Amino acid sequence: MHDATFFLTVGAARDSEVPSKLDGEFPAVDAEGAQYLDGNTVYFGTAADLIEERNEDVSVDTDEISTSRAKALVPRAIDFYADVSTDPGFIGVSSRSDGEWFIKRIAAQTGVTVKETQIDVDAFADHIREQTEIRDAWNVSHSRDFGGGKEKTSIDYHDAADIETAQNGTIGLGFEYMWDNEFVEGVIYESGYVAVYSDGLLEEGFAYWVREEVLPFLEVDRDDGAETDQTELPDEEQDRAEVAATDGGDDGVAE
C-alpha cells in the first residue's frame, strides 16, 4: 500500500531536485528519482528527523498523584512523494505531524510555496466515469451542510456504494478502475489524503499516478493556513477502509 497526505506547491522551482542527505545525522533524507517521458522527475523515499513530543509523567506519593508533561525529542520517519517540476506541483507525506519539517525543507530548497490542499472528489469521480467503463466504487462518503451547525455525513460501502452517486458533496471515495493498463484500487478524501492498495504500483508508479490523476483535482484549501479537519486517515477508519477493500465493510450515517 502507498498513502500520503498531499499539499499543493505553487511557483516555479529554482531547482526541482530533492537531494538525499545521509551523513549519519538527523535530519536524514533517502531520495530516489524517476524520470517521466516528458523529462520531468518525481522524487520519493524516506526521511527522518527528531520530532518534539510531550510525554506525560505521573508521580505517586502518599498524599497525591501528580502529573506533568515533559518535552522529548524522538526519531520519526516518514515516506514522501514530491514533484515540484511543474507549477502547480505536489508534496505528499505519510504522516503530516512527523513530516512537517520535510515539507518546509523542500519548500526552502526549491523555492516553491506550499499550500494547504483539498481534493475535489466529485470532479475526480467524474474523471473516472468519463475515461473508462471499467470502474466501480466500494466506499462513497457524502457530507451535507444544512446550516445552523447541522451537518449530515453518510458512508455507503460495497453493494450500497455506487460510483454514479459520487457527486454533489462527496468527501471520500473508495474506487477501483483501469488506468494505464493497471487496475488501481484505493481511497481518496477531500482532506488531501490518498491511498492506493494495488500491488502492481511501485513507489514511482504511485507518484506518477498522483501526478496524472490526482494533481488536476488538488486545489487550495478554502481555509488556507489553518489545519484541515482530516489530514490523515484515522487508524480506525484506515482499518475499515482496508477491510472494505477486500471483503468487509458496513454502512453508517452520522449527524
Image (spheres, rainbow, N blue to C red):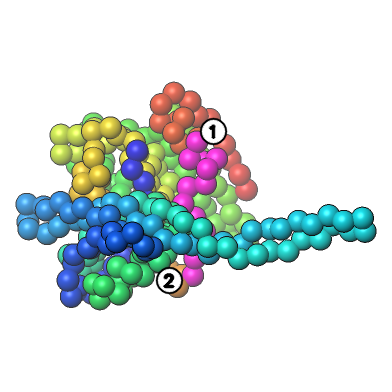
Stretch of the chain drawn in magenta? 226-239
Residue tagged 2: 224
Q: Is residue 19 left or right of residue 175?
A: left
Quarter of the image with the N terminus is top left
Q: Tell me the kind of residue under disc 2.
A: Asp
Q: What percent of the width, then of the height, locates residue 107?
A: 30, 71
Extreme residue toward the front, this view: 24
Few, some or many C-alpha atoms within 10 Å of disc 1 (few <14, some 14-19, many ≥20)?
some
The residue under label 1 is: 251
Residue at screen point 49% across, 65% down: 227
Residue at 11 percent of width and 53 percent of height: 35
Looking at the image, residue 214 lies above or below residue 200:
below
Circle 1/circle 2 CB separation < 8 Å: no
Residue at 40 percent of width and 31 percent of height: 245
Kindly indicate the quadrant of the structure image that contains residue 197. Answer: top left
Which amino acid lies under the numbered mark 1 shown in the image of this protein? Asp
Question: Residue 32 or 118: which is nearer the viewer?
Answer: 32
* Residue 29 as seen in the image, left or right of residue 35: right
Residue 43 appears anywhere in the view: yes
Magenta stretch: residue 107 in it? no
Q: Label 1, label 2: how many angstroms apart (C-alpha)?
A: 32 Å
Residue 220 picture location, percent across and down: 36, 67
